[in-house]
Amino acid sequence: MIILLTNDDGIQAPGLTALQSACAGLGEIYVVAPDRERSAVSHAFTLHSPLRAEQVADRSFAVDGTPTDCVNLGVHAILPDRPSLIISGINRGGNMGDDLTYSGTVAAAMEGTMMGVPSIAVSLDLLSSAVDDYHHAASVAVRIASMVLQRGLPPDTFLNVNIPPEGTPQRILITRQGRRVYGGMVDCKTDPRGRSYYWLGGGELDFVDEPGTDFHAVKRGFVSVTPLHFDMTNYRSLSLLQGWIEGEKKEDADA
Ligand code: MN
């Protein structure tokens, strides 16, 4: 059985290394990952330049592209056969709430799902970015990967797994996507040549602490597993918008 690992923190990231070691017993493990950090590239896909994949170790390839590129190259060009599972991670930092829309980690799992391969994204919520111990997170990832291999996933569904920092209970809660509250601050500074530059993503991050959500679970020390799909249709708005069209027709008829 072939399992493909990728990430968005780059092939050197400790989360990927820990995942690779922990998964060794699950099957034939291949790593196809970006050659450098590509966090927050979302579902970006390289269409206008060639890609290179450098073999850096046995069954391990560094690609000068995005996580989505890596899944494509892995499945269609590098792996000897179709993978039974794709795991993206373990990301340095949680991927919850509205942050999912930016996440390269989550997008790689989405890409796998679009190809019909069961896929999971795994992230470790860190208290400090200096921490690089992913061992407990890797064992949680293997536990969930084993469940997926055994039971499969519903069509068009992938799992977004978020693990709390070490030292907390490891019970799994099935959650829904929560809401992030962004600080919206842009840092403006002056470079040594007197020109302005900007740094996005500043300011305090917060979240809506609502029961049943990914944030609520992880902040209380639970492992959060959210089933995701990529149909972004807002079903609750369909009839509202249909009403607009009906109204327009009526106005035309009255005119
Ligand atoms: Mn990342």
Image: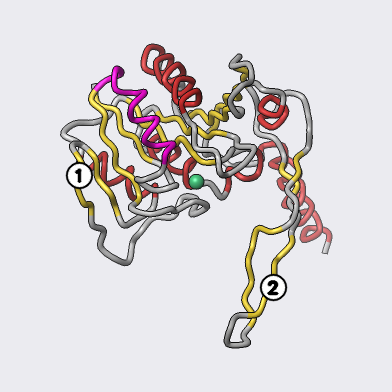
Element type where label 2 sits in the image: strand
For residue 178, which numbered disc appears in the image?
none
The residue most toward the bottom is 193
Place of residue 200 in the rendered image (x, y in percent of width and height, measured from the top left):
64, 63
Instruction: Answer whether labels 2 and 1 touch (C-beta < 8 Å).
Output: no
Residue 20, by quadrant, is top left
Residue with the most extreme right position: 254
Picture coordinates of residue 249, whole percent (x, y): 74, 55
- The residue to which callout 2 is attached is 188
In percent of width and height, residue 21 lies at 33, 27
Residue 77 - label:
1
Name which residue type carries label 1. Answer: Ala
| Residue bounds of the magenta highlight | 14-27
Residue 13 belongs to the span the image colors magenta = no
Report x, y in % for residue 219: 70, 29
Give the residue type that dot 2 points to.
Cys
* Helix, strand or loop: magenta stretch: helix
Q: Earlier in the sequence, mark 2 or mark 1?
A: 1
Q: Is residue 20 magenta?
A: yes
Relative vertical location of residue 58 with respect to residue 155 in this rendering, above or below: below
Labels 2, 1: front one? 2
Q: Measure the alpha-carbon separation of dots 2 and 1.
A: 43 Å
Q: Name the outermost residue toward the left.
A: 80
Q: Is residue 18 above or below residue 36?
A: above
Q: Is residue 212 left or right of residue 29?
A: right
Which quarter of the rendering shows the C terminus?
Answer: bottom right
Q: Residue at 57% of width from left, 40% of height from top?
A: 93
Crowding around mark 2 (Cα neighbors within 10 Å: few <14, some 14 to 19, many 20+) is few
Residue occupying the far front of the picture: 130
